[in-house]
Amino acid sequence: MPQPKYRKIAVIGYRSVGKSSLTIQFVEGQFVDSYDPTIENTFNKMISVHGQDFNLQLVDTAGQDEYSIFPQSHSMDIHGYVLVYSVTSMKSFEVVQSLHDKLLDMVGKIQVIKPEEGKKLADSWGAAFMESSAKENETAVEVFKRIILEMEKADGNAPPEEKKCVVM
Ligand SMILES: Nc1nc2c(ncn2[C@@H]2O[C@H](COP(=O)(O)OP(=O)(O)OP(=O)(O)O)[C@@H](O)[C@H]2O)c(=O)[nH]1
């Protein structure tokens, strides 16, 4: 069975369009009739889609308009955005378009350091290089296995040869 994938999703849109109601309907299976403006709420839910388990973190955000500065916290570590508008509010429809533009603008500005650049730097130091994410157990474990092997090498203890299949 594959490990559950962690995914963080932000629900964004104009005020009072139903972001909280939609999120709570999904998480708790109930419709909230009352209106209580959100500052920010986080929900967790496990869901299986096409045989893969997902550990979701849902961020129900405060309502924004076209003049709001897109909060930095909503641009970090988010895997996906749900843009919500109300069918009865033209203003909210305009706001999702403005939010979409802001998102594209932000993504264009995110600088990603390519693995080749990291490798080049490590090579210049004569050090080992690995790209890892603390969100993935496998690559995190690999980092520490690798440093152990490098320390063993430095101590003159060459890693044991992998056993090869011998045919006689
Ligand atoms: N009829 C109807 N009402 C809805 C629907 N979704 C939300 N509402 C109502 O709209 C109001 C606002 O809903 P919220 O979910 O609080 O809206 P929000 O976007 O989270 O609001 P902010 O926190 O201010 O950004 C509430 O009274 C809800 O009951 C819907 O699909 N249909």
Image (tube, rainbow, N blue to C red):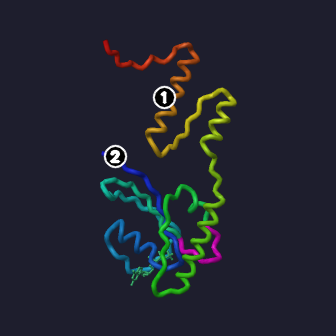
Q: How far apart are marks 1 and 2 (CA)?
A: 22 Å
Of residues 91 and 18, which is closer to you in this image? 91
The answer to whether residue 115 is above or below residue 145 is below
First in sequence: mark 1 vs mark 2: 2
Q: Which secondary structure lies at badge 2?
A: loop
Q: Residue 46 in the image: x percent, y percent?
A: 35, 57
The answer to whether residue 157 is above or below residue 65 is above
**Outermost residue toward the front?**
168
Predominant secondary structure in magenta? loop
Mark 1 belongs to which amino acid?
Lys
Left or right of 33? Residue 113 is: right
Q: In which quarter of the image is ligand 1?
A: bottom left
The residue indicated by pointer 1 is 145
| Region of the chain picked out in magenta, as a range | 62-70
At x 61%, y 61%, the residue is 107
The residue indicated by pointer 2 is 2
Q: Residue 90 in the image: x percent, y percent?
A: 53, 86
Quarter of the image that includes the N terminus:
top left
